[in-house]
């Protein structure tokens, strides 16, 4: 099952299915060896705004949540449920 990278839980291992459409980001990821088929680990996400701390082998890098939402992945080792948006207190 393919999901957005921005929706996986901290500690999850995933296989990259698609790259983002943003040309500069796509080029940067490819230059680092991040291509469809590679395995990534979501180490943690920063607050607020949710910058994602990712690892590929010994390389670690960060992605903004809005860029991660453009990347589709397959869960390899789920560490719990997908991230669910917190309830809206105004609702």
Image: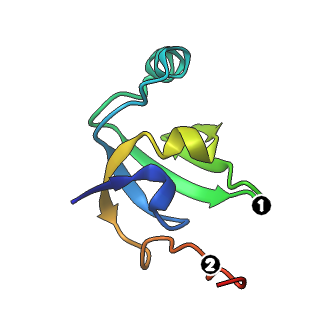
Is 55 drawn above or below residue 80 in the view shown? above
Vertical placement of 53 versus 23: above or below?
A: below
Q: 57 and 52: which one is in front?
A: 52
**Apparent side of residue 2 relative to residue 84 in the rendered image (left or right):** left
Q: Quadrant of the N terminus?
A: bottom left
Q: Element at badge 2?
A: loop
Going by the image, does 76 lie left or right of 24? left
Among numbered discs 1 and 2, the one appearing first in the sequence: 1
In this figure, what is the number of numbered marks? 2
Q: What element carries label 1?
A: loop
Q: What residue lies at 43% left-to-right and 46% top-to-bottom? A: 40
CB atoms at circles 1 and 2 under 8 Å apart?
A: no
Q: Quadrant of residue 28?
A: top right
Residue with the mark numbered 2: 86
Residue 38 location (% of width, % of height): 33, 37
Write down the quadrant of residue 24 in the picture: top right
Q: Position of residue 12 (x, y in %)?
A: 45, 63
In the image, farthest residue toward the front:
91
* Residue placed furthest toward the right: 48
Q: How far apart are the alpha carbons under marks 1 and 2?
A: 13 Å
Q: Which residue occupies 31% across, 60% down?
A: 75
Mark in the foreground, 1 or 2:
2
Residue at image mark 1: 47
Where is residue 52 drawn, in percent x and y?
Answer: 62, 50
Applied colour scheme:
rainbow
Few, some or many C-alpha atoms within 10 Å of disc 1 (few <14, some 14-19, many ≥20)?
few
Q: In this view, does 71 lie to the left or right of 6?
A: left
Q: Residue at x 51, y 43 (%)?
A: 68
Q: Quadrant of the C terminus?
A: bottom right
Mark 2, other Cα within 10 Å: few <14 / some 14–19 / many ≥20: few
Residue plotted at (49% across, 22% down): 22
């Amino acid at each position: 099952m393919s999901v957005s990278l921005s929706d996986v839980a901290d500690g999850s291992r995933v296989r990259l299915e698609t790259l983002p459409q943003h040309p500069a980001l796509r080029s940067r990821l490819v230059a680092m060896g991040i291509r469809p088929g590679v395995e990534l680990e979501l180490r943690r996400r920063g607050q607020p705004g949710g910058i994602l701390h990712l690892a590929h082998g010994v390389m670690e890098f960060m992605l903004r949540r809005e860029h991660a939402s453009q990347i589709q992945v397959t869960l390899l080792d789920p560490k719990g449920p997908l991230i669910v948006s917190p309830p809206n207190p105004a609702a």
